[in-house]
């Protein structure tokens, strides 16, 4: 480890230790608001292909028909706005 990196790490450790000693845990946590429940949504493995990446020609059609099961033929129908709308409706609208 070179000398400048070592000096940096020691300085950072001293600064952090000083901050912990100067501000006790009670003072750091007293002003915090209670946490609200957190909702996470994951839209994974969408296999989305942007319309500008294909011409919908013969080669694309052949790949779609003989492909690996991806819903590439329906990519224009898959809209991220629709997915986000359904997620936000479920979170804030109470729907399923």
Image (spheres, grey):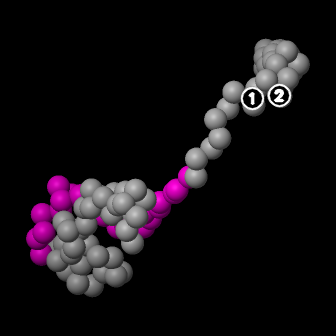
Residue 78 location (% of width, % of height): 25, 66
Inspect the magenta stretch and tell me whether residue 56 lies in it: yes
User: Residue 5 vs residue 77: left or right?
Assistant: right
Q: Main secondary structure of the magenta part?
A: loop
Q: Residue at x 23, y 58 (%)?
A: 50
Q: Decide: marks 1, 2 in contact (CB < 8 A)?
A: yes
Residue 56, numbered circle: none
- Residue pointed to by mark 1: 30
Q: Which residue is nearer to you in this view: 41 or 57? A: 41
- Residue pointed to by mark 2: 26
The range drawn in magenta is 38-58
Q: Quadrant of the N terminus?
A: top right
Inspect the magenta stretch and tell me whether residue 24 lies in it: no
State the SS at label 2: helix
Q: Residue at x 29, y 76 (%)?
A: 71
Residue 31 location (% of width, % of height): 69, 27
Which image quarter: residue 23?
top right
Distance, label 1 to label 2, CA atoms, is 6 Å
Q: Which residue is nearer to you in this view: 29 or 6? A: 29
Q: Quadrant of the C terminus?
A: bottom left
**Circle 1 residues within 10 Å: few <14, some 14–19, many ≥20:** few
């Amino acid at each position: 480890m070179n000398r400048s990196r070592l000096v940096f790490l020691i300085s950072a450790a001293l600064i952090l230790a000083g901050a912990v000693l100067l501000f006790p845990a009670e003072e750091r946590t007293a002003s915090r608001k209670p946490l609200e429940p957190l909702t996470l949504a994951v839209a994974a493995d969408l296999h989305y292909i942007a319309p500008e990446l294909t011409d919908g020609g013969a080669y694309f059609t052949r790949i779609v028909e003989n492909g690996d099961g991806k819903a590439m033929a329906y990519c224009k129908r898959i809209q991220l706005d629709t997915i986000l709308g359904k997620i936000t409706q479920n979170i804030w609208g109470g729907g399923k």
